Image: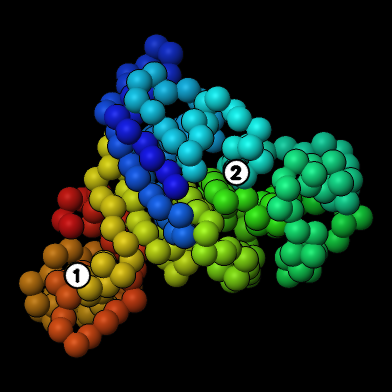
Amino acid sequence: MIQVKNLSFSYKKKSPLFTDFSLEVENGRIVGLLGKNGAGKSTLLSLMAGLNIPHQGEIIINGYVPAKRNPNFLADLYMVPEEFSFPHVSIQVYVKAFAPLYPNFDNEKLDAILKEFELERPSNLNKLSHGQRKKFLIAFALATNCQMLILDEPTNGLDIPSKSQFRKILVSSVTDDQLVIISTHQVKDIDTIIDKVVVIDEGEIIYQENIEAISQKLYFETVTSLSDADKSLYHERCPIGYKVIVNAIKGKESSIDLEVLFNAIINKKI
């Protein structure tokens, strides 16, 4: 469980990024953390992982204060950063060196995911493409079975088939007691796998809602003209007309277009 209470943080010689920021998310969720560039997403993830220290307020993750770097906390949290590097070793050597740090690491699970991603243990990590290395890092993260997984821009560098694989593998690999936080600009890559949306802007939460609740409140559709959309809350042009959001229609359900929802939120229409 994530509990962020009255958090304040800023980088040296810069304006405060967070001021009196609070957030609470229970386990058993896959959360999409969305926001524009500079909104504070990556910094918030770093604070949750204990890589930065709050100036005021507190962060508690599954009963631990991340900044204290308790070994039990570190053994049950794994973060896939946007930028990463590997030593000049094979996948097999890397796993042998780092898997023991995670008590619940599952080698069989890793092998199954590597097979899905078409990766082999003898492969040298630094001879793989960026996308292949990203896929290995995701596979390793899921195999740790950590109670909390933090994924910062996990689909960057993945081609279209790999993004589809990522969605399928993530949903099938995560258990009901895990908490997954996914921060991304590629909102279409996660719109079918998350069950909660959190949008931050200028260091503040401007929207948070469960996917089920969104489905009950809003209806998403594509129309050829705005006259076909009765009292739309938000609309934007698309090649065949307009993508619109309207209030929920009794007896009808729609798939949530996360990109359109995000644009509506940022434009303060929702």
Q: Nearer the viewer, residue 131 or 225?
A: 131
Can you tell which mark lies on residue 256? none
Q: Where's residue 10, x and y in %?
A: 38, 21
Q: Which residue is mark 2?
A: 77
Task: Relative to 228, say whether 30 is above or below.
Answer: above
Q: Where's residue 66, x and y in %?
A: 52, 31
Residue drawn at point x = 28 percent, y = 58 percent: 209
Q: Where's residue 101, x and y in %?
A: 75, 41
Helix, strand or loop at mark 1: helix
Q: How is the image coloured?
A: rainbow
Residue 132 falls in which quadrant of the image?
Answer: bottom right
Kindly report the distance in space between the C-alpha atoms of the residues bearing marks 2 and 1: 34 Å
Residue drawn at point x = 55 percent, y = 25 percent: 68
Residue drawn at point x = 42 percent, y = 44 percent: 2
Q: Quadrant of the C terminus?
A: bottom left
Q: Nearer the viewer, residue 269 or 6?
A: 6
Q: Which residue is mark 1?
A: 217
Give the left or right position of residue 93, taking residue 248 as reference: right
Task: Relative to 152, say whether 53 is above or below.
Answer: above
